[in-house]
Amino acid sequence: MLETSEHSAAAGHRFDTVLIANRGEIAVRIQRACRELGLKTVAICSEADREAPYGKTADSFLCIGPSTAAKSYLNQDAILLAARLAGAGAIHPGYGFLSENAAFADAVEKAGLTFIGPTASSIATMGDKISAKRAMKMAGVPCVPGPDTALPDEPATIERIALEIGYPVIIKAAGGGGGRGMRVVPKADLLHEAIALTREEARKAFGSPSLYMEKFLEHPRHIEIQVICDDHGNAVWLGHRDCSMQRRHQKVVEEAPAAGIAPDIIQPVGLACVQACLQIGYRGVGTFEFLYEDGAFYFIEMNTRLQVEHPVTELTSGVDIVQAQIRAAQGHVLDLTQGDVTCEGHAFECRINAEDPETFLPSAGVVTHLALPAGPGIRVDTHIHAGYKVSPYYDSLIAKLIVHAPTRAEAMARMREALAGTEVEGISTNIPFLRALFKDGAFAQGETDIHYLEQWLKLRRAA
């Protein structure tokens, strides 16, 4: 586990310029939050992003490398050099790329800069799924049935663990994420083959063959709890989100709050998350992810960064999560207590991707026409414009369409109208797919789990 450098607290309380170590819509979002806080911004880019619009609105704009992410947005030395050249006192990693890289967080702090996020130690603890599960159990957070230790090598011991948990089980890479490094095992005679395949996948993808085993829940929902913590022993949770609409373990639509979960069921879980943060000395924003089935919550992981879906919580809680994250890094005391947190109305977020709506293959090219919806309760987070060239080098997310209304039904109706008014030409997008999804009856009734979207897509293809 990495140790946080000794001077991090001192460095973390003094900066007036933030380097945004990311691209796309999240770079725009962070830049806006910084400006509203009176902070200067440094935007960086790869050669593919030289014409990015947020470069023109930043105080400094530096190209740090070639188009491939490994040589630019993942190049730690280049990012630190850019921060020094531009006089930045802090680095905001956004999401993806280096946002959950403990070594990078440590390098930022050791360079005398502030990492806008948790300490390297917290990232390392929660980034390893086994140590995270152990920490959550100690804090009283409910976890998926299964040991909080890595699987041993002895076949007989592995078989015994699986029998104690009960089939079906799921094998996961300790350092995994993004839907990779996991396999469901429905019965005993498939166990050892699954172990061997997942170990090799984990070794190649995450640099470690370490695995763990849990009970596979067959019809759960994916529920998240958003937290914000300062360096002074204060922490709050900002309600909950449902992120069950997933394709290949990738979220497509998110909403807040999760429908049909009574306050007396969710509140103890939220308070346990706050307690866990205080226990590990967590700073900044973070998200606890759970599977929810038959009225019970089961912790699966914590994301130690800003989430793509943070806007739905911003709209329901009224809290600017990005500003709160930056202020925590500056050393400010959290300016709200749990009693101040009230969540009102309902919000949906659609991820608009540059991809074929049937095959979901990425679609690069020039946006020739763009029309975005506007009006009460509608928000669009994007970096694209007519004439923008969508690059083939990065994630296909080009915009997030978010709506807010007094009720879930009204928010759904608002999203249908917003999607109808969204036009992107010159490239393929998943907008037709999203329009069809928001007309689905089961989704409208909230009768879905994490497997629903995959099944829905199969039925559409067969029709």
Image: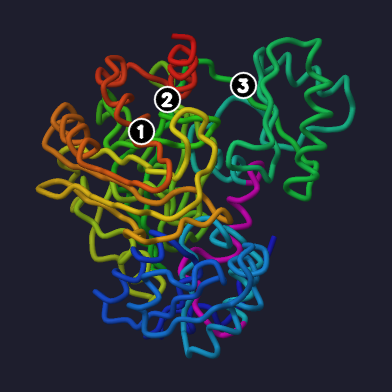
The image position of residue 290, as x and y in percent, is: 46, 33
Q: Label 1 amino acid?
A: Asp
417 left or right, relative to 301: left
In the rendered image, the quadrant that contains the N terminus is bottom right
Among the two numbered marks 3 and 2 on one chain, the one whose residue lies closer to the N terminus: 3
Residue 428 is drawn in which quadrant? top left
11 left or right, relative to 377: right
Q: Which mark is residue 215?
A: 3
| In this view, 211 is above or below 13 | above
Mark 3 or 2: in front is 2
Given contact means CB atoms under 8 Å apart, are the residues at marks 1 and 3 in contact?
Answer: no
Q: Which residue is mark 2?
A: 221
The image position of residue 147, as x and y in percent, is: 68, 30
Circle 2 residues within 10 Å: few <14, some 14–19, many ≥20: many
Numbered disc 3: secondary structure = strand
Given contact means CB atoms under 8 Å apart, are the residues at marks 1 and 2 in contact?
Answer: yes
Spatial CA distance of label 1 from label 2 is: 7 Å
Numbered disc 1: secondary structure = strand
Residue nearer the viewer, 319 or 386:
386
Mark 1 or 3: in front is 1
Q: Label 2 amino acid?
A: Arg
Q: Which mark is residue 242?
A: 1
- The magenta region covers 111-131
Spatial CA distance of label 1 from label 3 is: 21 Å
Among the two numbered marks 1 and 3 on one chain, the one whose residue lies closer to the N terminus: 3
| In this view, 156 is above or below 239 | above
Given contact means CB atoms under 8 Å apart, are the residues at marks 3 and 2 in contact?
Answer: no
Residue 272 is drawn in which quadrant? top left
Numbered disc 2: secondary structure = strand
